[in-house]
Image (cartoon, helix red, strand yellow):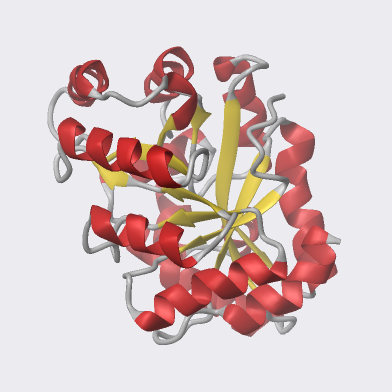
Amino acid sequence: MTDHQFGAFGITTGLDGSAESLDAARAAEELGYPAIWLSGGPLPGLQTIVDLVGATTAIKFVSGILGVTKYSAAEVSTTYASLEATAPGRFTAGLGGAHGPKPIATLNGYLDELDVPVERRVLAALGPRMMKLAGERTAGAYPFLTGAAYSAEARKVLGPEKLLAVSHLVVLETDADRARAIARDTLSFFTRIPGYVASFERQGFSAADQAELPDHMVDALAAWGSPADIKAKLTEHLDAGADHVAVNVITGETGPQPIEQWRALAPTLLG
Protein backbone atom coordinates (compact mmCIF):
# COMPACT_ATOMS: atom_id res chain seq x y z
CA MET A 1 0.00 0.00 0.00
CA THR A 2 1.04 3.61 -0.49
CA ASP A 3 1.71 6.59 1.74
CA HIS A 4 0.34 9.75 0.18
CA GLN A 5 0.35 11.56 3.53
CA PHE A 6 -3.43 11.60 3.80
CA GLY A 7 -3.46 9.42 6.91
CA ALA A 8 -5.98 6.66 7.50
CA PHE A 9 -9.05 8.90 7.83
CA GLY A 10 -10.01 12.19 6.25
CA ILE A 11 -13.25 14.00 5.49
CA THR A 12 -15.51 14.20 2.44
CA THR A 13 -17.66 17.30 2.45
CA GLY A 14 -19.04 20.06 0.28
CA LEU A 15 -17.52 23.48 0.85
CA ASP A 16 -18.60 26.48 -1.19
CA GLY A 17 -16.09 29.14 -0.20
CA SER A 18 -18.47 30.96 2.13
CA ALA A 19 -17.28 32.23 5.51
CA GLU A 20 -18.99 29.22 7.09
CA SER A 21 -17.12 26.85 4.79
CA LEU A 22 -13.78 28.49 5.53
CA ASP A 23 -14.52 28.15 9.24
CA ALA A 24 -15.41 24.48 8.75
CA ALA A 25 -12.12 23.82 6.96
CA ARG A 26 -10.23 25.48 9.81
CA ALA A 27 -12.18 23.41 12.33
CA ALA A 28 -11.34 20.17 10.51
CA GLU A 29 -7.67 21.13 10.53
CA GLU A 30 -7.73 22.01 14.22
CA LEU A 31 -9.33 18.64 14.99
CA GLY A 32 -6.42 16.93 13.31
CA TYR A 33 -7.95 15.59 10.12
CA PRO A 34 -5.18 15.36 7.52
CA ALA A 35 -7.27 15.82 4.36
CA ILE A 36 -10.55 17.19 3.04
CA TRP A 37 -12.03 15.73 -0.13
CA LEU A 38 -14.15 18.45 -1.70
CA SER A 39 -17.45 17.26 -3.18
CA GLY A 40 -17.77 18.59 -6.70
CA GLY A 41 -21.46 19.49 -6.58
CA PRO A 42 -21.31 22.34 -4.04
CA LEU A 43 -18.02 23.67 -5.44
CA PRO A 44 -18.78 26.95 -7.26
CA GLY A 45 -15.41 27.15 -8.98
CA LEU A 46 -11.70 26.53 -8.74
CA GLN A 47 -11.12 29.76 -6.85
CA THR A 48 -12.89 28.14 -3.90
CA ILE A 49 -10.05 25.62 -3.62
CA VAL A 50 -7.52 28.46 -3.60
CA ASP A 51 -9.53 30.24 -0.90
CA LEU A 52 -9.76 27.12 1.27
CA VAL A 53 -6.04 26.43 1.03
CA GLY A 54 -5.35 30.05 1.88
CA ALA A 55 -7.64 29.94 4.92
CA THR A 56 -5.79 26.97 6.44
CA THR A 57 -2.16 26.15 7.12
CA ALA A 58 -1.40 22.47 6.54
CA ILE A 59 -4.48 20.34 5.83
CA LYS A 60 -4.50 18.82 2.34
CA PHE A 61 -7.33 19.29 -0.14
CA VAL A 62 -8.37 16.91 -2.89
CA SER A 63 -11.09 17.76 -5.36
CA GLY A 64 -13.40 14.80 -5.09
CA ILE A 65 -14.32 15.35 -7.86
CA LEU A 66 -13.83 17.96 -10.57
CA GLY A 67 -15.99 17.11 -13.58
CA VAL A 68 -13.78 17.10 -16.66
CA THR A 69 -16.66 18.36 -18.78
CA LYS A 70 -17.00 21.40 -16.51
CA TYR A 71 -13.39 22.37 -15.84
CA SER A 72 -10.85 22.40 -18.64
CA ALA A 73 -7.45 20.76 -18.29
CA ALA A 74 -5.87 24.17 -18.73
CA GLU A 75 -7.90 25.68 -15.88
CA VAL A 76 -7.06 22.85 -13.50
CA SER A 77 -3.40 22.98 -14.50
CA THR A 78 -3.26 26.72 -13.79
CA THR A 79 -4.91 26.29 -10.40
CA TYR A 80 -2.52 23.49 -9.49
CA ALA A 81 0.52 25.54 -10.51
CA SER A 82 -0.68 28.55 -8.53
CA LEU A 83 -1.21 26.49 -5.39
CA GLU A 84 2.13 24.72 -5.77
CA ALA A 85 3.79 28.12 -5.82
CA THR A 86 2.10 29.31 -2.63
CA ALA A 87 1.24 26.13 -0.72
CA PRO A 88 3.25 23.24 -2.16
CA GLY A 89 1.96 19.74 -1.63
CA ARG A 90 -1.49 20.72 -0.39
CA PHE A 91 -3.69 20.19 -3.45
CA THR A 92 -4.34 17.02 -5.41
CA ALA A 93 -6.60 17.11 -8.45
CA GLY A 94 -9.37 14.53 -8.23
CA LEU A 95 -11.09 14.13 -11.59
CA GLY A 96 -14.07 12.33 -13.07
CA GLY A 97 -17.50 13.00 -14.51
CA ALA A 98 -16.65 11.98 -18.07
CA HIS A 99 -20.22 11.39 -19.17
CA GLY A 100 -21.06 10.29 -22.68
CA PRO A 101 -20.48 7.30 -24.95
CA LYS A 102 -16.67 7.16 -24.57
CA PRO A 103 -15.72 8.13 -21.00
CA ILE A 104 -12.34 6.36 -21.08
CA ALA A 105 -11.33 8.15 -24.27
CA THR A 106 -12.57 11.45 -22.84
CA LEU A 107 -10.49 11.03 -19.69
CA ASN A 108 -7.43 9.87 -21.61
CA GLY A 109 -7.59 12.97 -23.78
CA TYR A 110 -8.04 15.17 -20.74
CA LEU A 111 -5.09 13.61 -18.93
CA ASP A 112 -2.97 14.12 -22.04
CA GLU A 113 -3.57 17.85 -21.72
CA LEU A 114 -3.38 18.10 -17.92
CA ASP A 115 -0.15 19.65 -16.63
CA VAL A 116 -0.32 18.09 -13.18
CA PRO A 117 2.15 15.39 -12.06
CA VAL A 118 0.84 11.83 -12.08
CA GLU A 119 1.36 11.58 -8.32
CA ARG A 120 -0.92 14.57 -7.74
CA ARG A 121 -3.95 13.44 -9.71
CA VAL A 122 -6.54 10.78 -8.88
CA LEU A 123 -9.64 9.47 -10.64
CA ALA A 124 -13.12 8.76 -9.37
CA ALA A 125 -13.37 5.12 -10.37
CA LEU A 126 -16.04 2.45 -9.95
CA GLY A 127 -15.83 0.07 -12.90
CA PRO A 128 -12.81 -2.09 -13.68
CA ARG A 129 -11.86 -0.15 -16.83
CA MET A 130 -11.86 3.16 -14.99
CA MET A 131 -9.96 1.59 -12.10
CA LYS A 132 -7.34 0.32 -14.55
CA LEU A 133 -7.02 3.79 -16.08
CA ALA A 134 -6.59 5.30 -12.61
CA GLY A 135 -3.76 2.90 -11.94
CA GLU A 136 -2.07 3.57 -15.26
CA ARG A 137 -2.33 7.34 -15.48
CA THR A 138 -2.84 8.77 -11.99
CA ALA A 139 -1.78 8.29 -8.37
CA GLY A 140 -4.81 6.09 -7.80
CA ALA A 141 -8.56 5.87 -7.37
CA TYR A 142 -11.31 7.45 -5.30
CA PRO A 143 -14.46 5.29 -5.27
CA PHE A 144 -17.73 6.08 -3.47
CA LEU A 145 -20.57 3.87 -2.21
CA THR A 146 -18.58 0.68 -2.08
CA GLY A 147 -18.04 -1.99 0.55
CA ALA A 148 -14.86 -3.59 1.83
CA ALA A 149 -15.08 -6.46 -0.67
CA TYR A 150 -14.89 -3.86 -3.44
CA SER A 151 -11.74 -2.40 -1.88
CA ALA A 152 -10.10 -5.82 -2.00
CA GLU A 153 -10.90 -6.18 -5.70
CA ALA A 154 -9.87 -2.60 -6.46
CA ARG A 155 -6.49 -3.20 -4.84
CA LYS A 156 -5.91 -6.14 -7.17
CA VAL A 157 -6.63 -3.97 -10.21
CA LEU A 158 -4.59 -0.98 -9.02
CA GLY A 159 -1.61 -2.96 -7.82
CA PRO A 160 0.25 -2.44 -4.55
CA GLU A 161 1.78 0.99 -5.14
CA LYS A 162 -1.24 3.09 -6.05
CA LEU A 163 -3.49 5.10 -3.75
CA LEU A 164 -6.90 3.67 -2.94
CA ALA A 165 -8.95 6.29 -1.09
CA VAL A 166 -12.56 5.38 -0.37
CA SER A 167 -15.37 7.80 0.47
CA HIS A 168 -17.83 6.12 2.87
CA LEU A 169 -21.13 7.37 4.25
CA VAL A 170 -21.22 7.82 8.02
CA VAL A 171 -24.23 8.38 10.30
CA LEU A 172 -23.34 9.18 13.89
CA GLU A 173 -26.52 7.68 15.29
CA THR A 174 -26.94 4.62 17.51
CA ASP A 175 -30.64 4.09 16.85
CA ALA A 176 -30.65 1.55 14.03
CA ASP A 177 -33.97 2.58 12.48
CA ARG A 178 -33.09 6.27 12.43
CA ALA A 179 -29.53 5.67 11.21
CA ARG A 180 -30.68 3.46 8.35
CA ALA A 181 -33.46 5.89 7.40
CA ILE A 182 -30.90 8.70 7.08
CA ALA A 183 -28.63 6.49 4.98
CA ARG A 184 -31.50 5.29 2.77
CA ASP A 185 -32.48 8.87 1.98
CA THR A 186 -29.01 9.49 0.52
CA LEU A 187 -28.62 6.10 -1.13
CA SER A 188 -31.96 6.34 -2.92
CA PHE A 189 -30.65 9.24 -5.01
CA PHE A 190 -27.75 7.18 -6.35
CA THR A 191 -29.92 4.22 -7.33
CA ARG A 192 -31.13 6.42 -10.20
CA ILE A 193 -27.65 7.13 -11.61
CA PRO A 194 -26.51 4.57 -14.21
CA GLY A 195 -22.86 4.43 -13.12
CA TYR A 196 -23.82 3.69 -9.54
CA VAL A 197 -26.51 1.23 -10.58
CA ALA A 198 -23.85 -0.73 -12.46
CA SER A 199 -21.50 -0.52 -9.47
CA PHE A 200 -24.18 -1.79 -7.10
CA GLU A 201 -24.85 -4.70 -9.45
CA ARG A 202 -21.15 -5.57 -9.57
CA GLN A 203 -21.16 -5.59 -5.78
CA GLY A 204 -23.97 -8.12 -5.75
CA PHE A 205 -26.94 -5.85 -5.03
CA SER A 206 -29.90 -6.89 -7.16
CA ALA A 207 -32.47 -4.65 -8.79
CA ALA A 208 -34.80 -5.51 -5.90
CA ASP A 209 -32.11 -4.50 -3.41
CA GLN A 210 -31.67 -1.18 -5.15
CA ALA A 211 -35.42 -0.57 -5.18
CA GLU A 212 -35.97 -1.54 -1.54
CA LEU A 213 -32.60 -0.69 0.07
CA PRO A 214 -32.74 -3.53 2.60
CA ASP A 215 -30.73 -3.43 5.81
CA HIS A 216 -27.86 -5.53 4.47
CA MET A 217 -27.28 -3.10 1.58
CA VAL A 218 -27.52 -0.04 3.80
CA ASP A 219 -25.16 -1.55 6.35
CA ALA A 220 -22.60 -2.39 3.66
CA LEU A 221 -22.55 1.13 2.24
CA ALA A 222 -23.04 3.30 5.35
CA ALA A 223 -21.30 3.10 8.72
CA TRP A 224 -23.47 4.01 11.67
CA GLY A 225 -23.56 3.72 15.45
CA SER A 226 -21.06 4.95 18.04
CA PRO A 227 -17.65 6.33 17.05
CA ALA A 228 -16.15 2.93 17.88
CA ASP A 229 -18.76 1.14 15.73
CA ILE A 230 -18.04 3.51 12.86
CA LYS A 231 -14.29 3.11 13.09
CA ALA A 232 -14.64 -0.67 13.07
CA LYS A 233 -16.74 -0.51 9.89
CA LEU A 234 -14.41 1.93 8.13
CA THR A 235 -11.37 -0.10 9.11
CA GLU A 236 -12.76 -2.97 7.06
CA HIS A 237 -11.74 -0.97 3.97
CA LEU A 238 -8.20 -0.52 5.30
CA ASP A 239 -7.94 -4.21 6.14
CA ALA A 240 -9.11 -5.03 2.60
CA GLY A 241 -6.41 -2.93 0.96
CA ALA A 242 -7.51 0.72 0.99
CA ASP A 243 -4.98 3.33 2.10
CA HIS A 244 -7.41 5.99 3.25
CA VAL A 245 -11.10 6.41 4.08
CA ALA A 246 -12.76 9.79 3.61
CA VAL A 247 -15.55 10.09 6.16
CA ASN A 248 -18.71 11.41 4.49
CA VAL A 249 -20.94 12.40 7.43
CA ILE A 250 -24.65 12.68 6.67
CA THR A 251 -27.24 13.86 9.17
CA GLY A 252 -30.51 13.78 7.28
CA GLU A 253 -30.65 17.55 7.37
CA THR A 254 -29.42 20.36 5.17
CA GLY A 255 -27.62 23.25 6.72
CA PRO A 256 -24.38 23.70 8.62
CA GLN A 257 -21.32 21.57 8.12
CA PRO A 258 -21.30 18.56 10.49
CA ILE A 259 -18.46 19.95 12.62
CA GLU A 260 -19.90 18.51 15.83
CA GLN A 261 -19.93 15.04 14.30
CA TRP A 262 -16.34 15.50 13.06
CA ARG A 263 -15.42 16.53 16.60
CA ALA A 264 -17.17 13.54 18.15
CA LEU A 265 -15.45 11.13 15.76
CA ALA A 266 -11.97 12.65 15.91
CA PRO A 267 -10.69 11.10 19.18
CA THR A 268 -11.61 7.61 17.96
CA LEU A 269 -10.60 7.95 14.31
CA LEU A 270 -7.47 10.02 14.81
CA GLY A 271 -6.35 8.95 18.28
Answer left or right for 2 relative to 195.
Answer: right
Of the pair 260 and 157, the residue shown nearer to us: 260
Residue 115's spot in the image, x, y percent?
Answer: 28, 23
Q: Which residue is painted at 63% across and 23% down in the image?
A: 155
Of the pair 32 and 87, the residue shown nearer to us: 87
Answer left or right for 35 relative to 229.
Answer: left
**Image quadrant where residue 114 sits:** top left
Q: Which residue is painted at 28% across and 43% down in the image?
A: 79
Q: Which residue is painted at 35% across and 47% down in the image?
A: 65
Q: From the viewer's perspective, is residue 150 above or below residue 230?
A: above
Q: From the viewer's perspective, is residue 127 above or below residue 89?
A: above
Q: Quadrant of the N terminus?
A: top right
Answer left or right for 179 relative to 19.
Answer: right
Q: Quadrant of the C terminus?
A: bottom right
Of the pair 244 and 147, the residue shown nearer to us: 244
Of the pair 125 and 67, the residue shown nearer to us: 67
**Image quadrant where residue 96 sits:** top left
Residue 89's spot in the image, x, y percent?
Answer: 52, 38
Q: From the viewer's perspective, is residue 95 above or below residue 235?
A: above
Residue 3's spot in the image, x, y percent?
Answer: 69, 30
**Image quadrant where residue 163 sits:** top right
Q: Which residue is painted at 44% across and 16% down in the image?
A: 132
Seen as rendered, the residue at the extreme front is 86
